[in-house]
Image (spheres, grey):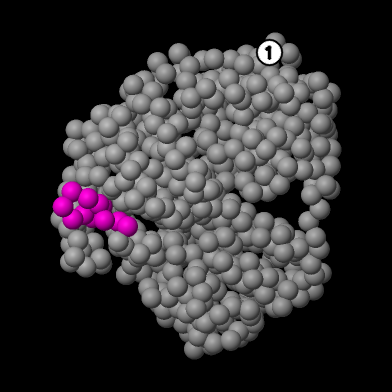
Amino acid sequence: MGGNLILILDFGGQYVQNIKRCLREIGIEAKIVPYNVGLEDIVKHDPNGIILSGGPYSVYMEKAPLFNREILELGKPILGICYGHQVLAYMLGCTVEKAVRGEYGFSELRLINDHPLFRGLGRREICWMSHRDEVTKLNSQCKKLASTVNCENAAFDYKGKFFGVQFHVEVSHTPKGHKILENFAINICKCRKSAWNIDKYIEESIQDIKAKIGESKAVAAVSGGLDSAVAAVLTGKAIGEKLTCIHVNTGFMRSNESESVVKTLREMGLHIVYRDISKGCLEEMEGTEDLDERRRLIGRKFVEVFEREAGKTGAEWLVQGTIAPDVIESTRGEAGKGGSRGHGGLIKVHHNVAGLPRGMKLKIMEPLSPLFKYQVRILCKKLGIPSEICGRQPFPGPGLSCRIVGKITSSKVDLLREITLYVEDQMRRYVSSQYFPYLVDPPQVKVRRLEEEVKKFIGERFKVEVFKYLQKAVGVKGDQRLIGDIAAIYIYRGLKALWSEIEWLNILKLQSRLTGLHPEICRVIALITKPNPEKYTLVVRAVETRDYMTASPSKVNFHHLHEMANEITQEHPEVGAVGYEITTKPPSTIEPL
């Protein structure tokens, strides 16, 4: 058996890079290969064990991806995760069917007995689910290891060699998930640990950039955010004065953002070119409603500027601060679709990946593409970049255009820009990973069926109204992209919302219940004020996340939100209601579009 390698078979799940990252953090070497990798290649790698990733598929769909059955004869330990759990069970003769109710987000895991895979865990643990199918019947040689309220066979063992877990051990919202992966790699597969060396990573990155760019010149896209700044500094260390950094003001930036960004980056010693294309961008975006089109438009506008500036210096390369979630969400998420960079389809059009125009002349350099946000923050501090950048709130490349659910107009952009200043100032106290407001266009319609479901869940002591907006938002369920509904709940007595009287855990369970029972719902809003059918709804979003692949809503003070709602609606009469998004990721994404 090899000394320190886990082979990951990629079935197209959005968390496959998380598996690799988690193993490397533990100190285990990991390699991702296609799910249909040949037996000879596996034998050549001689891994200690094999992990089957999740994916946006069902084992009973036509042409469902299956692994080579001969792999089961190699004698290597195998761990299946989510779809990997289902496909392993299916190929072992178990039954997989569509679940009565999907599970998205937190679930309580009940461990049935002691097992080496779960060493160090309690009898009850929190796990993170994202599935619509489940293993409904195990064969006689499989032993059930764990269950949840909605998933009877949440984990199994086949002869002490093959293991399946329906939940995602590789995300931070399964608190003991790293321990399960460590148990599999160290205790079951007998791997050996080795530490990650950040200084070595920086040096290897600089040498890699030097080798690729050579004697050529490059331009770097810098938004002023964490990712693009770190990419620019690494590239600057590699090629020095051959790098020109470009900041583009699209008109969708936050208040005074471009001026502040350019000043900070110049103080860092970077050569910055500033270009303002806000007038043209706003004119071209006006009236745009399609959520993917607006991201592609921004991507095209960026590249036009970069190529024009590159022509002035003779640059051949474009350096981008693309990180792992950008690539993952732009290259996988639609079963049955394939692409040059990913497993198939997309969850979201990131402007710097799927939003890049075809036929662009510049070659792409993405030194951070294997990394997640918290890893980039570590690099940022190590490189001596100012704390105002290392700790900066994430902001999407297309800016405020991603935070307007409905048609883009210049008046909405100005309104949201002004409200963003206030909301960011107020939400800073919660120290969330990310916080921001977004606008949703009217109208909305009442849904009696959902009202009854909410009443059953919270009891009869409250009055309840539930609305659905006609505008759609982006979500992800079972690793599959969803353009879904926004449900908004108003729980009140008299004229006052009463969210503060409901336990936070029950609020999380409520959103999980609605999104699990209703495949079309991907976002749930707790309304602080009742919506006006002719005015905008302003939604505050704040989340806790480590890797930005999963997220949970921040626990907030609803009395404070009520004060904020009064201030916003009084100062901005265009806003008819204020709400707080209580959805986890999945089934939502962090940004609404």
Residue 338 vs residue 539, the one in the foreground: 539
Residue occupying image coordinates x 26% and y 29%: 574
Q: Position of residue 227 (x, y in %)?
A: 64, 37
- Check the picture and name the quadrant holding the N terminus: bottom right
Q: Position of residue 580 (x, y in %)?
A: 35, 47
Residue occupying image coordinates x 24% and y 36%: 576
User: Residue 263 sits in which quadrant?
Assistant: top right
Residue 56 vs residue 478, the one in the foreground: 478
Q: Which SS class for mark 1?
A: helix
User: Residue 122 sits in which quadrant?
Assistant: bottom right
Q: Position of residue 301 (x, y in %)?
A: 52, 21
User: Residue 223 sits in which quadrant?
Assistant: top right
**Residue 496 within the segment the image draws in magenta:** yes
Circle 1 Cα neighbour tier, 10 Å, few/some/many (<14 / 14–19 / ≥20): few
**Residue 457 within the segment the image draws in magenta:** no
Residue 119 to residue 197: above or below: below
Asked whether residue 394 appears in the rendered view, the answer is: yes
Residue 165 vs residue 424, the one in the foreground: 424
Asked whether residue 93 appears in the rendered view, the answer is: no
Residue 102 to residue 425: above or below: below
Residue range (magenta): 489-500
Question: Which residue matches tag 1?
Answer: 311
